[in-house]
Amino acid sequence: MRYRDVVVIGAGAAGMMCAIEAAKRGRSVAVLDHARKAGDKIRISGGGRCNFTNINCTPKNFISNNPHFCISALKRYTQHDFIKLIQQYKIDYHEKTLGQLFCDGSANQIIDMLLTEMRKYQAELYLQCSISSIKKLETGYLVEHSDGVFECQSLVIATGGKSIPKMGATGFGYDVAKQFGLGLVETRPGLVPLTFEPNMLERIKPLAGIAVDAVVSCNKTKFKEAFLFTHRGLSGPSILQISSYWREGDEITITMQPDQDIFAKLRDQKTLNGKQTVTTALSYILPKKLAQFVTADIEQSKHIADLSDKILRQVADLAQQWRIKPSGSEGYRTAEVTIGGVDTQQLDSRTMEARNVSGLYFIGEVVDVTGWLGGYNFHWAWASGWAAGQAV
């Protein structure tokens, strides 16, 4: 049996950040993970370039049953703090839309940076290491794993959520929470494509691959970004964003080309070229196949000059007030995050420690804090890992 001050289970973004910060304070740290390599989700993120944070990151960009919980960690470890670390390692990066920051090169640069920091401060990494049991001791924890046993004073759970199971995601962290009496907020897939019932799916299948700028809303929440038709339903940034707020049975509203007055443009086309069909006129604004979809129920043999303003308004509303009820989502298989998780009411927001179980910490995606698309979830990993690292 070996002793370490801190054992971190999970070698992802949050786990490695926590290990680095704890080791900086002179704590002996072991990080355990069942994967073959550390940081697998970092490696595939952002198309392999890792959207590592967002310059606009604030607590308002996160979903939780307790929206105040994330404030402390995000204020004490900001996006600018992580950018300084990136700059120290001379990792070139660029900003895409809406404040998203990506590596110019490979996401492996971020992983290499974290592993270098771990080695620098002598935090140990054990891969392909499965956990068989965790036991509470008077002075800490006993962690039995495939390579032996660790005894530790502080135990950090950084195992993520259920999203992308083919990469090894499991509900392990939730099981640990339940073992020690912590409550869970119901989990569900987040940042995930939405699907439709067979009849609607058959109608939109010919549109697969078409992307359009839009405002997509559900209840009182809306996002202005592109959406994409797929063979299974709808995807793209605005759909992924709204999926985190959508619940089964909810209707979503899609406003295509929100910066244009489609009704006014159709009236202009009616004046300029009254002999064209309404579908042709709409094709100046939307992709041709999408224009055909929107005008499918309009008499195509008529010239636009013969259509009343009422009909033109109906066409515009179909494009800019398209109300549709998804039947479901693609689930954890493709979800970028898991919404819900360990109930934050039972964690200390400054340290991430369980209030009623001394020495037990939960960080990252396993906690009921979920960010928007665009680097926010990585920043929660850095910030929560940093916060726990100051306390373990």
Image (cartoon, helix red, strand yellow):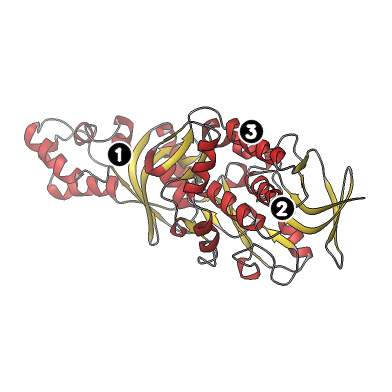
Q: Residue at x 51, y 62 (%)?
A: 71
Q: Which residue is mark 3?
A: 112
Residue 58 percent across, percent down from the top left:
44, 56
User: In the rendered structure, which amino acid carries the disc numbered 3?
Assistant: Asp
Query: Is residue 247 shown to the viewer in this render?
Result: no
Which marked residue is nearer to the observer: mark 3 or mark 2? 3
**Numbered disc 2: secondary structure:** loop
Instruction: Look at the picture and state if 303 lies above or below 25.
Output: above
- Mark 3, Cα crowd under 10 Å, few <14 / some 14-19 / many 20+, is some
Left or right for 60, reference 361: left
Task: Say above or below: 70 vs 385.
Answer: below
Compare residues 243 and 206 and report the one nearer the observer.
243
Kindly identify which residue carries mark 2.
171
Q: Is residue 16 visible?
A: yes
Find disc 1 in the rendering and name its residue: 296
Name the residue nearer the viewer: 354 or 314: 354
